[in-house]
Amino acid sequence: MKIAEIFTSLQGEGLASGYPTIFIRLAGCNLSCSYCDTPASRQGGTDMDVSEVVARVLLEKPHYVCITGGEPLLQKNEVTVLSCQLMNAGKKVSIETNGTVPFDDLPDGVSVCMDVKCPSSGESSVVTLLPNLKSTDSVKFVVGTDEDLKYAEKIIHTHPIHAEIFISPIYGTDYQQIATYILEKNLPARMQLQLHKFIGLP
Ligand SMILES: C[S@@+](CC[C@H](N)C(=O)[O-])C[C@H]1O[C@@H](n2cnc3c(N)ncnc32)[C@H](O)[C@@H]1O
Ligand SMILES: Nc1nc2[nH]cc(C(=O)O)c2c(=O)[nH]1
Ligand code: SF4
Ligand SMILES: [Mg+2]
């Protein structure tokens, strides 16, 4: 596996936000989002066997593990084996993915958080993957402009989504304006902020 970093922090996003979590950040990405806060992980990385990653993770205490990147599903075969071994060891595994790689063949116990890339990212996700999300999964719209909000609203209202919906401001954008939009439109979505960035955690 190409690994960018393995670290422990509080989960800053999504369904397990606030919980101590072990992060496995895989290296390599197929997109180049305008706002990406981890551009260094889009290439390079250190070669590690799955068994080495498991051994490293099991040195840490948290129950939650978040496999992220870069785009982790570019290494889907290894991620599948890794997830199974971590779940067998009693860990709760989630995956952050950019919505360009099918995830319906991942092990059942894994909680998928699928990004839907909005216009200001300069990228796009495969929105036809949305119906494959389960109730234990989540979808995240990272927004920074009115166009992004309008896009998120359109996708939410035109695609069957069985998962929790998060609207996440690009860090440093106008949180009040985004909150006002969600309220005015009464979107069936939870606004989140990247908790770790406000605390100063990785
Ligand atoms: C770094 S990405 C890695 C996983 C996957 N490549 C993806 O984009 O979903 C993890 C999450 O951070 C979000 N993110 C990246 N840069 C951000 C920023 N500047 N502000 C808010 N969220 C950001 C992404 O949209 C994604 O939800
Ligand atoms: N604390 C913390 N929580 C996170 N949740 C998702 C992250 C990511 O980069 O995928 C992330 C991250 O980078 N740090
Ligand atoms: S898909 Fe994720 S890792 Fe890749 S550029 Fe976009 S935010 Fe960054
Ligand atoms: Mg991050």
Image: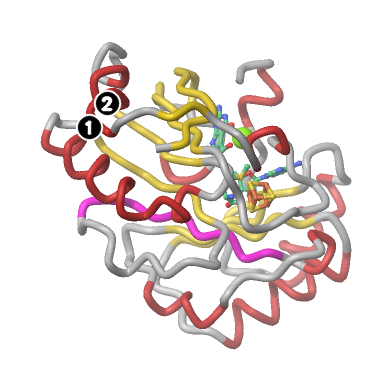
**Answer yes or no: do the residues labelled 1 and 2 have beta carbons within 8 Å?**
yes
* x then y, percent, for residue 144: 83, 55
* x then y, percent, for residue 146: 88, 66
What label sits on residue 91 in the rendered view?
1
Mark 1 residue element: loop
First-in-chain label (1 vs 2): 2
Residue denoted by label 2: 63
Q: Which residue sits at x=50%, y=33%?
A: 25
Looking at the rendering, which quadrant does residue 117 occupy?
bottom right
Mark 2 residue element: loop
Q: State the predominant SS element of the stretch in magenta.
A: strand
Mark 2 residue CB less than 8 A from any atom of ligand 2: no
Quarter of the image where ligand 2 sits? top right
Quarter containing the N terminus: top left
Mark 2 crowd level (few <14, some 14–19, many ≥20, 10 Å Cα): some
Quarter containing the C terminus: top right
The amino acid on which the numbered mark 2 sits, given as a three-letter code, is His
Q: Which residues are magenta?
A: 109-117
* x then y, percent, for residue 147: 86, 71
Looking at the rendering, which quadrant does residue 93 occupy?
top left
* Left or right of residue 176, residue 141 in this image: left
- Mark 1–mark 2 Cα distance, whole angstroms, equals 5 Å
Which residue lies most toward the bottom here? 158
Q: Which residue sits at x=43%, y=31%?
A: 24
* Left or right of residue 98, residue 35 in this image: right
* Vertical comparison of 71 with 82: above or below: below
The amino acid on which the numbered mark 1 sits, given as a three-letter code, is Lys
Mark 1 crowd level (few <14, some 14–19, many ≥20, 10 Å Cα): some
Q: Nearer the viewer, residue 184 or 115?
A: 115
* Vertical comparison of 8 with 11: above or below: above
Q: Nearer the viewer, residue 35 or 196?
A: 35
Q: Which residue sits at x=88%, y=60%?
A: 145
